[in-house]
Amino acid sequence: MTAVEPVAESPATLPWWRREDERLLAGAGCFVGDVRVPGMLHAVFVRSAHAHGRVRAVDVDAARESPGVRAVLVAADFAGLVAPQVNALLPSLTLTTTGAMAADQVLAVGAPLALVVAETRAQAQAAADLVWVDIEECPFVADAFADPGGLGALDIDTGVPGNLVAKLRFGDGVMPSRAPTAAARVQQPRVAASPLEPRAAVMQWDPANGRLMAWLSTQTPSRARDELARALGLPVDAVQVIAPDVGGAFGGKASVCPEDLMLAFAARRLGGALRWQATRGEDLLSAPHGRASQAEGALWLDGQGRIEALSARFHFSLGHWLTYSAVVPARNAARIVPGPYQVAQCTAHAEARLSNAAAVGIYRGAGRPEAAILVERLVDAAAREAGIDPLDLRRRNVWPADALPRTLPNGQWLDHCDLPGLLDHAAELFDYAAQRAAQAARRARGEHMGIGIGLYVEPCGQGHESVQITALADGRYRLATGATAQGQGRETSFAQIAAEALRCAPDQVEVLHGNTALCPPGVGALASRSTAIGGSAVLAAARALRARLDAGESLPCRVDHVHTAEHEAWASGCVMVAVLVDSSTGELRIERLVWVDDAGHVLNPALVQGQLMGGLAQGLGQALMERLVYDDNGQLLTGSLMDYALPRAADMPAVHLASHPTPSAANPLGAKGVGEAGCIGVPAALLNAAYDALAPLGVHQLDFPLTAGRLWQAVQDANPPSK
Ligand code: SMO
C-alpha cells in the first residue's frame, strides 16, 4: 500500500474535507469483517430451503464429524433464547413470542436451522453442507397484503398469534359521498438495504469475568447491548458493543437479528470467540428487507381546485419475524398523510401482516416514501382529471410559509418550511414552463416525454440523544456521542458543532462513537435524526463546557448532556424530473432532474450533498431497478447482485441540486434531516413523470420498479383513449 501524500494545506479548511475519508479511502478502515480476535472460531448458519414447513428432522451427525468442527447447535440448544424485542409503539401491536431459532417449523426460506462452528470459515461451510434436514412442506404466503375478502383468506398457520400486526387510524375525516376526483394504487416492492458490508459479528465471551464483547455491524449499539444482555440474562454493563466502520446501514442494521443473539449465546457456550460474516446472498435472503407495501388512495377536489378530502390505506407485509421497528413504516406512512397539503378531511389507515418471507424492517425513508409517493401520485392524477397544471394544483394547496410551524388536525406538528418557495425555486431551475411547452411540441411529434413533480415533507425523528464532552488536560477535547455513524461523516459534523461553541479548531475535538464502553447510552443513527437531535446535544454540552472553562474550572472537565427534542424536525423538498420513454422498448431515460432540498440550517454543505446524492441513488434504484422477487415456491429468485439490480455509477443521471433552507423550529441548530430525502422525493417524481409520459397512450397503472419490460408491457396493455 502506498502512503498517502500529506496535503499541503490544512485539510480541515477544504470545503469537501471529511476527517473520516483519508482513513477509509486509504483502505485503513476497520469493518467487523476486519476484526480478528485470538483463537476465534468461525460460524455458518444452515438455513431453510422451504418457505413454510414442519421440521421432521435436523441431522447434524455428519457435520459434527467434519474436519475442524467444534460444535453444531440446533434449535434445542437455543431453547429459551427468545426473538429480539419489538418497539411497542402501537397499542394494538401483537407481540410475537417465537424463539430465536424455530424448533418444529420453519416460516421462511432462509430461516436458520443450525449453527456450525469450526476452526475456519471454509470448514464451517463444508460441515454446514452436510447437515441433513427433513421438512414437510406446508402452504405459505410469500407477501401478505390486505384482501377485501377479510383476514380469513390469509389466515395461514404462521405459528404466531394474530396475522394482523398493526392497524391504526389518524384523523376522523368523513369522505364526500360523491366519486373522488382521482384514485391511485401504488405498490412498493420488497427491496434490499444493500450496505457495503453485509451483516457481520464477532462475539467474544470472557469466561473469567462473565463478560461479552460484541463487534457488530449495527446502527444502534446501545439497543444491541441491551438486547444481547437481555437474551443472555446478563446485566447491561457485562456487555460491550463496538460498531466499528459500518459502511452503510439504511435501516437494515437498526434491529438486532436472531442470528446475533444465537452467536452471542454460542460464544458463551463455547467459552470463546466466534466470527460470523454473512455473504451477500445470505443477506439478500435473510437480512431485514425494506418497503413491501401496497397503498391505495382517493382525492377529492372542490370547484376551486382545493383538496377537499383525501383518504389513504397502506398495507405492509412484514415477513416471518418482527424487527424492532417493524411497524414504524406503517405508523410513519399513516401519520405523514396528507403531506405538504392543507386538506379539510383526511383519513389514513395502515395495517401490516406477517408472511412466509424474510422480515421487513425500516429502510431509508421508513414509511415516508410510501406516504409521499401515494399523495404525490394522487395530486398528479387529480390535476389531470381536473385539467389543472400539476404545479399549479400544488401551489393552490400547500401550506403557506407563514402558517408554519403548526400542529395539524392529525396531531402531527409540522415544522417551519417554505413549500411555495420550494415549488418556485424548483420550477425556475427546471425551467418548468419551457419544459411543458417543449413537451407539447414533442408529443405532437410522437415522443413520449413526461414531467413529474415530487413534493414532500418528512419528519426526522423524535426522542433524545446523549453526549459527553471532556476538556482534557493537554488542551484537546474528547466528545463521546450516543449517536453513531455508518459513513455520514458524523465525526466531521460533530467536531464542527463542538468546535464552534468551544472556540477551538475542529481537529482539537476527538469524536468517539459506536462503542458502548466509551460512549453514553444513546439511540443511534436512524430516522435522519442524528444532526438535529444528537447535534443539538453536542451544541448544548459544548456551550456548557465553554462556560465552565471560562469560569476557570480545572482540567480535565467533563459535561454530560441528554437533549430531548420537544418537536420533530421536518425536512422538505421538491424534485422535478423530465423523462423520455421509448414506447417500442420501454426504456426510460432521465433528461433532467432538479432537486431543491430544505435540510434546515446546513452545517456542512459537502456532507449534505453526499447524503442527498446517496439517497437519490437509492431512491432511483427503488423506482427504476430494484425488486426482490419470490417465485411461486417461496424461493428468492434475486439471491445475488447478478439478479438483484442495484444502480451503478453509469445509471446515475446528471443531477441539479439546490438548497432552499429554512431553519427548523424544533432544535437550537435549526437543522433538519437529510439522509432519507432522496428515497422520498425522487421516486415520487419519477413515477409521476412515467405516468405523464405514457398518459397519451392510455396507460393507467404503473408499478415500481419502472423497468423497460414493465413500461413496455404497460404500453401493450393500454387502451388508447378515443380521439
Ligand atoms: S430507515 Mo432509517 O435507518 O431510520
Image (spheres, helix red, strand yellow):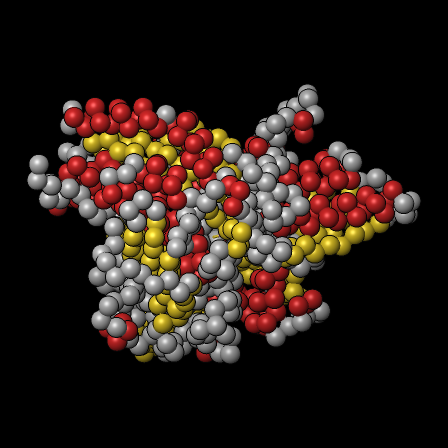
Give the residue at x 42% y 63%: 170
Q: Position of residue 621 (x, y in %)?
A: 36, 42
User: Is residue 330 placed above or below 342 in the rendered structure?
Assistant: below
In the depicted view, which residue is nearer to us: 723 or 641? Answer: 723
Reply above or below: 718 against 361: above
Residue at image point 30% right, 55% down: 297
Question: In this figure, what is the number of numbered marks?
Answer: 0
The percent coordinates of residue 133 (x first, y second) are: 33, 71
Across and down, in percent, residue 49 comes to 31, 64
| Location of residue 144 (image quadrant) | bottom left
The outermost residue toward the left is 722
Residue 381 in percent (x, y) is at 26, 45
Q: Quadrant of the N terminus?
A: top right
Query: 424 left or right of 445?
Result: right
* Camera-side residue of 393 and 443: 393
Q: Is residue 258 above or below residue 466?
A: below
Q: Can residue 264 be seen at all in this image of the molecule?
A: yes
Seen as rendered, the residue at the extreme top is 8
Residue at 40% across / 42% down in the picture?
455
Q: Which of 520 and 118 is in front in this view?
A: 520
Residue sitting at x 59%, y 62% = 223
> Relative to residue 71, is residue 139 drawn left or right?
left
Q: Can residue 63 be seen in this view?
A: no
Task: Determine which quarter of the picture holds residue 347.
Answer: bottom left
**Quarter containing the C terminus:** top left
Q: Is residue 93 left or right of residue 271?
A: left
Q: Would you identify the image quadrant in which residue 379 lies? A: top left
